[in-house]
Image: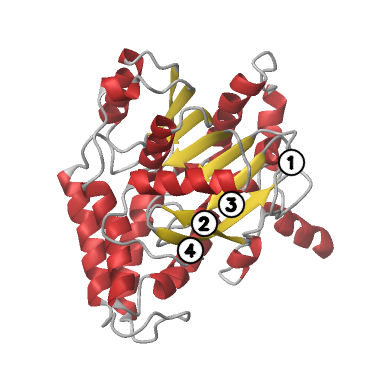
C-alpha cells in the first residue's frame, strides 16, 4: 500500500493509505469521473477493517474507495502524541485530500471515527458531500465503557516493559497471556459472539500490528494511550448550534447488538441533527459495535444509497443489486494481510469446491 508524506499542523506526517477503483486494486490516484468515499476507521484496528466494503461490488464498481491509517495505527509511521485530538486527525485528513487533489468526498465513519468525520465537515463543509456515521459515540463516553477501555490499556501496559527504542518487529518480550486476555475482550466488544473467519483474521493481523506500533518504547505506549483513551475521554461535545453548520446529507446507523452505546443515545444525536435542520436519515440494523464488518449486506447498501442520493438522486439502487452484493466479492488490497491468519474469501472457497468436483 502506498505512503504519502504530509506537512501537518504538528510537523511532517507519513501516512499509509489505499485507493481502490473499479479497474485498479490499489492505485495512487482516483478515477476523476467517479465519486470518492473516504473510510475513517475507529479504535483498535486500522483501515484494513473495511475489507467487507472494499470487497463489495456494490461499492467498488461505482466509487473510488479510500482508506487511511490514522496516526498511531497500522503502517502510518507517525505516532500519536499528547494533544492529538479528533480535530487534529480531521485536519490530517483534509491535508491528505488536498495532497491527492481530491476536491470533494463522501465519508463513512465508525465509532470514534464519526467524531473525526464531524470535525472534518464542520471545519471544511465545502469538502464533504455526505456523511454516513455508524455506531456514533454519545456526547459523553459512558463511564462503564471508559472503565473497560482503561482496563484494555492497563493490560497492554502490563504486558511488557515498553522501554528502549522504537521497533519494526513484533516485541518478543510481551506477556502473551495478558495480550490474549485483552484481545478476547476487544473481540467481544467489537464483534460480539460472531465466529466469522474474517473477524479472526482482523484480530490476528491487528494484534500483530499493535505489537509493532504500540510496544517497544514509552513513545509508542503514549501513542496507544492517546488513541485508545484520550480520544474518548477528551473529545469535543457538539451542540445543536455547532451541528447546524453541517450542510450535507447525513445517514446515522445504530447497530442493535452493540454493548457500548445505547439506542436512545443514537436517537438523541439524530434528534439534535434534526433540531439543527440537518437532512438526516436514521437506520437500525442488527449487528455488534462493528456491524459493518459482521453485517456488510445490511450496511453497504445504506452507504451506497446515501452517496447516490447526492450524485444521482433520480437513480435509486435496484433491489436485485443489493442481493447480488451479498453473494459476490472482489479482491482487495488487504486480502494478502489476512491469508496467514486463515482467511479465505467466499470466491476462494468457491474455487476450491469447484476444483474438488
Q: Nearer the viewer, mark 4 or mark 3?
A: 4
Q: Are marks 1 and 3 in contact (CB under 8 Å)?
A: no
Q: How many angstroms separate mark 3 from mark 2 (CA)?
A: 25 Å
Specify few, some or many for label 2: CA neighbours under 10 Å numbering under 14, 14-19, or 20 or more: some
Q: Identify the secondary structure beneath mark 3.
A: helix
Q: Earlier in the sequence, mark 2 or mark 1?
A: 2
The circle drawn on residue 6 is: 2
**Mark 2–mark 4 distance (CA, rounded to whole Å):** 17 Å
Vertical relation: 262 (above or below) 53: above
- Give residue 42's position: percent from left, percent from top: 41, 49
Q: Residues within 10 Å of mark 4 (few under 14, many from 20)?
A: many
Depth check, mark 2 against mark 1: the one in front is 2
Q: How is the image coloured?
A: secondary structure
Q: Tell me which numbered mark, 1 or 3, is placed earlier along the sequence.
A: 1
Give the quadrant of residue 135.
top left
- The picture places residue 76, in percent across and down from the top left corner, at 49, 63
Observer-nearest of 173 and 167: 167
Amino acid at each position: 500500500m502506498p505512503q504519502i508524506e504530509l506537512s501537518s499542523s504538528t510537523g511532517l506526517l507519513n501516512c499509509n493509505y489505499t485507493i481502490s477503483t473499479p479497474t485498479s486494486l490499489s492505485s495512487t490516484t482516483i478515477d476523476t469521473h467517479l465519486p470518492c468515499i473516504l473510510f475513517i476507521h475507529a479504535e483498535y484496528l486500522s483501515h484494513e477493517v473495511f475489507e467487507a466494503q472494499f470487497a463489495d461490488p456494490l461499492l467498488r464498481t461505482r466509487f473510488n474507495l479510500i482508506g487511511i491509517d490514522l496516526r498511531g495505527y497500522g503502517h502510518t509511521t507517525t505516532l500519536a502524541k499528547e494533544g492529538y485530538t479528533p480535530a487534529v486527525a480531521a485536519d490530517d485528513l483534509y491535508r491528505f485530500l488536498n495532497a491527492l487533489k481530491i476536491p470533494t468526498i463522501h465519508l463513512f465513519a465508525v465509532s470514534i471515527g464519526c467524531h473525526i468525520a464531524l470535525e472534518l465537515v464542520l471545519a471544511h463543509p465545502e469538502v464533504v458531500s455526505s456523511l454516513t456515521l455508524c455506531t456514533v459515540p454519545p456526547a459523553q463516553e459512558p463511564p462503564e465503557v471508559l472503565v473497560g477501555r482503561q482496563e484494555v490499556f492497563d493490560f497492554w501496559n502490563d504486558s511488557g516493559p515498553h522501554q528502549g527504542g522504537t521497533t519494526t518487529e513484533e516485541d518478543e518480550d510481551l506477556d502473551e497471556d495478558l495480550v490474549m486476555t485483552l484481545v478476547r475482550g476487544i473481540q467481544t466488544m467489537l464483534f460480539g459472539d460472531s465466529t466469522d473467519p474474517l473477524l479472526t483474521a482482523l484480530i490476528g493481523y491487528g494484534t500483530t500490528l499493535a505489537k509493532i506500533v504500540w510496544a517497544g518504547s514509552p513513545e509508542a505506549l503514549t501513542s496507544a494511550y492517546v488513541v485508545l483513551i484520550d480520544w474518548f475521554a477528551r473529545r469535543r461535545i457538539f451542540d445543536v448550534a455547532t451541528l447546524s453548520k453541517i450542510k450535507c446529507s447525513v445517514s446515522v446507523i445504530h447497530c442493535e447488538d452493540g454493548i457500548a452505546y445505547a439506542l436512545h443515545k443514537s436517537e438523541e444525536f439524530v434528534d439534535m441533527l434534526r433540531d439543527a435542520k440537518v437532512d438526516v436519515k436514521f437506520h437500525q440494523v442488527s449487528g455488534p459495535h462493528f456491524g459493518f464488518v459482521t453485517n456488510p449486506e445490511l450496511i453497504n447498501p445504506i452507504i451506497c444509497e446515501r452517496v447516490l442520493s447526492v450524485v444521482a438522486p433520480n437513480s435509486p439502487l435496484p433491489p436485485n443489486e443489493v442481493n447480488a452484493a451479498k453473494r459476490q466479492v472482489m479482491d482487495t488490497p488487504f486480502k494478502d494481510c489476512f491469508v496467514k491468519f486463515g482467511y479465505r474469501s467466499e470466491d476462494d472457497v468457491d474455487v476450491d469446491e469447484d476444483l474438488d468436483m
